[in-house]
Amino acid sequence: MSADEHPFLLAAAGLYLLSALLCHGRWPMRGDRAGRWGMAVAAAGCGLHAAAIALCIVAARHWVLTELRATLLLVGWAIPATYLIALRRAPIGLATIAMTLAAAAVFGALAVPAQPLGQTVDHPWFFVVHVTAAVAGYAAFSLAFCCTVAYLVQEALLKRKRLVGFSQRLPSLEAADAMGARLAALGFVLWTLMIATGALLAWLEVGEWWSWTPKQTWSLLTWTAYAAYTHLRTIGDYRGRRTVLILAVGFVCAGLTYLLAGYLGDPYHPFHSS
Amino acid sequence: MHIIAVGLNHRTAPVELRERVAIGEDELAGLASGLAAGGAFAESAVLCTCNRSEVYGCVPEVDAAVARAVELLAQRAEWPEERLKPHLYAYEHAEASRHLFRVACGIDSMVIGESQVLGQVREAFERAVALGSASTVLTTLARNALEVGKQARTETNIGVGRLSVSSAAVDLARSVLGDLSGDRVMVVGAGEMSELTLTHLVDAGVRSIRVANRTHERARALAERFGGEAIAFDEFPRRIAESDIVITQTGAREPLIGPAAVREALRVRRSRPLVFIDIAVPRDVDPAVGDLANVFLFDIDDLEAISAHHLAERQAEVVRVEALISNQLARFNRWLKGLQAVPLIQQLEAEFERVRQDELERALRRIRGLSPEQAAGVDQALHRYKQKLVRPPIEALKRLVESDADEEILAIFREVYGLSARPPSEGQPGEGDSA
């Protein structure tokens, strides 16, 4: 991987931050106009980000990017891209949270050193589905987490009687809850697909379905957390703060699956290839 | 031609007088012909809302027109002119246009930034066009007013944030519950404020309504009005669990709803968020209820703080709206100036054409025996000559008018080309008047 994409990534992260600021709606602009500009700036950032990823792919001469830095770039791109497609009509304060997270992902990618690619596999198509489902799942969980943050911030503002300003730009508690649930359901389906293809791949490559490696264990824990959340919310009909906090727990599990497991030395998902 | 605005509004006249002057739709035609009589008004339009009655006009002579308008308004009010006059304002020229722009933007309204007035301005001028009393100048003025009115509402926060306490309550319920159409509301204590809040909630889509009141009759009356259900007063604590929004306004000296009852309700609701709007003073809901998770308790102070905040925000936006108005006014005045040039250009062309015709006749009289082709050739030559002579001054005139030439320059222009101050054909729309 080369450093050609650095300027693009810096610009994209800058645009995401600017978008977050605009969507916050206090400075440098106010009102609906700020929101419209915020979305436009985010779209520009997303375009530059896509260009940077294309440069990475060209430099790697490989379609599937698996190491930490590249996947951070992919997830960091999928967050604003999904937002612009599916959530652009949501109350604009949510974009402040989502674009901040996207910028954090890009800065994270810039901070970690580029790694050579991991091992090659004999069944590239399963591998492509596995990695794609994982990246999309992380993005869906991240956006669901943004809804969680929106819920908690809105709740805190209402409880503290900060009733005008950012509170009015954030989704209502019920809307944040409903959006979070939909995104979590989407992530849950993708995650299930990711685990299934991962197991299949493991069986095809090493002849073992499941071997309790750190990554496998944590991804199963994540799956369980989201399963519990969905179960409580749909079948149990529970709502409110505690249910929303389970969603946050799920995101923490997903984050640990992503980072910790890699550094714990997972044989199939090495971040440090030797 | 000059633009004037004469009238009164909520700041200059008490409601009794505004009622007297109010002009009904059926009286508009009579008023328009009264204004036009004797040529006092070339164009007129009447704007009448509950807070204002105003006459807008495009007039040849300001003082005469104002006097006519005052006379007719006094007649309408059946009120002596001398006693009406102190309540009237009369704006002329750019100030009249600016006044209409301010009205359209809602910054001249009693509730600052309200948007209803924009539709009222549109209707008033549409009616004037239908009656035939408004034409080019006033319709363009109205179009500019509507443009800046819309611009003010999209580009500034003059219309943002609702101002009444009861609508603030609805906004708060929305920040918790989002779309209210599927939500259930319970009113405890059928007071005036709780009724008003209920009205706003029903407008926002709430369909399921319960009312509890100490006197059951009143509960039933209110419930019937909104298609809801009246419940016995001592039954309400058990119904909290079935409600998403609880509005309280009773005369009780001690809180009626304590944390224990609400905690139980939350258990039944499986922690679904619950909104209390406590309008009563002293309060009906124990403040400790607000500390429970998933409960959102708002009292009258919270609601009043929100509406005060919105009012302050709107007032702060007036400066930005005034800037938009000044821009629009500059555009409109350029157009109006340009209109002054039209008769002058027509005069100039007519003058040159007259000279051409004279010279053509003289030439054809002198040079005898010309074939029709030769005669046509002379005609064409003179025509081209005229065109070449007349074009530069017309271009210069357009430039002058666009660059804010004042009356004096236009007078010099007339002097140089020997044009009279009064155009040859009287009564043309938008004719220039150098007086």
Image (cartoon, coloured by chain):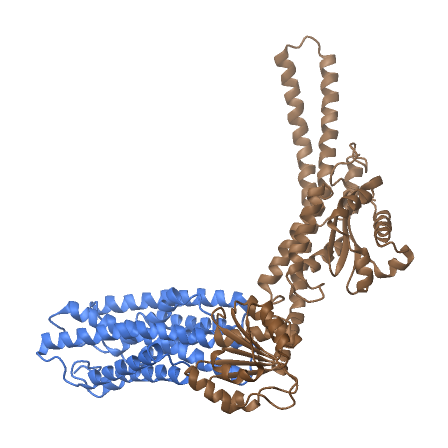
Chain colours: A blue, B brown
Q: Position of residue B36 (x, y in %)?
A: 80, 42
Residue B307 appears anywhere in the view: no
Q: Is residue B316 left or right of residue A180?
A: right
Q: How many badges with numbers are in the image?
A: 0
Quadrant in the rendering for residue B288 = bottom right
Can you say whether A252 is above or below B157 in the image? below
In the displayed structure, A182 sits above or below B408; it is below
Decide if residue A244 is on the left or right side of residue A127. right
* Residue A78 in sight here: yes
* B271 is higher (above) or lower (below) than B368: below
Between B237 and A261, the residue placed more toward the observer is B237
Examine the image and state in which quarter residue B149 appears. Answer: bottom right
Residue B343, above or below A25: above
- Residue B400 on image: x %, y %: 70, 45
User: Where does residue B375 sit, x and y in percent of width and height?
Assistant: 65, 15
Figure quadrant of the N terminus of chain A: bottom left
Q: Name which quarter of the figure residue A234 lies in.
A: bottom left
Q: Position of residue B74 (x, y in %)?
A: 86, 53
Q: Please state, as top left, top right, bottom left or bottom right, where the C terminus of chain A lies in the image.
A: bottom left
Q: Residue at x 74, y 25 (%)?
A: B355
Residue at 58% across, 71% down: B223
* Residue closest to the eye, A74 or A2: A74
Indicate left or right for B30 with B242 as reference: right
